Amino acid sequence: MPKYLCGMNYFELFELPVSLQVNKSSLAKKYFELQRQHHPDFYTNAGEAEQKDALEISANINKGLKVLQQPDETIKYVLQLKGLLEEEEKYQLPPDFLMEMMEMNEKLLEEDPADFRKEVAELENSLYGEIKDIVENYDDNTIKREDLLKVKEYYFKKKYLHRILDRLGD
């Protein structure tokens, strides 16, 4: 892999500031630019090592795009960059939230699925409201650890809510 791509995080790769909300237009523009430079199809006549590098770089570009296009994955990625989230981490949610989720699980069996989805969406919006300013005004140079920990709790609460929704099926 070319030296300039080694050790880069996805924000550096796409020349974007570290943020919890990615500018989708800038991301797409840089993605196409990078793919024009590094797509394996442009290296069919190159040597085996160059072809391998192009394949690896292209895969990394695609992986970065996938992460930065999805808000929850971007939050997870930033928390990992900051050393605040480990892969497969077992996060301990607050007891009051877990009690609320037990009640939600009971409602899941009793309520109309559409009403239940609406209730979960309202709860999710309420949870987001608690961190909205942090997400929308994120500054990598001034962000406080405690603010990132609030975002981390939101991330795990939202994940929990989505697991409950997954039980509803389609």
Image (tube, rainbow, N blue to C red):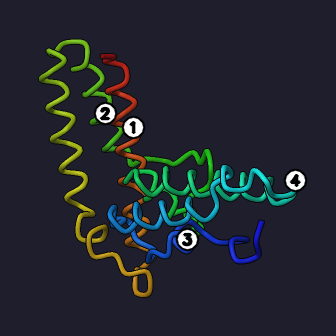
In the picture, the quarter occupied by the N terminus is bottom right
Q: Are marks 4 and 2 in contact (CB under 8 Å)?
A: no
Residue 166 screen position, x and y as percent: 37, 24
Q: The disc labelled 3 sits on which kind of residue? A: Lys
Which of the two marks, 1 or 3, is nearer to us in this view? Answer: 3
Q: The disc labelled 1 sits on which kind of residue? A: Tyr
Residue identifier under label 4: 48
Tell me the crowding category of disc 3: few under 14, some 14 to 19, or many 20 or more residues within 10 angstroms, Cα based. few
Please determine whether, in this image, residue 97 is positioned above or below residue 10: above
Residue 52 screen position, x and y as percent: 80, 53
Q: Are marks 1 and 3 in contact (CB under 8 Å)?
A: no
Depth check, front residue: 14 or 127: 14
Query: Which mark, residue 101?
Result: 2
Residue 69 screen position, x and y as percent: 40, 53
Which of the two marks, 1 or 4, is nearer to us in this view? Answer: 4
Task: Looking at the image, tell me whether mark 2 or mark 1 is earlier in sequence order.
Answer: 2
Q: Secondary structure at mark 3?
A: loop
Q: Residue at x 47, y 60 (%)?
A: 32
Residue identifier under label 1: 160
Residue identifier under label 3: 82
Task: Looking at the image, tell me whether mark 1 or mark 4 is earlier in sequence order.
Answer: 4
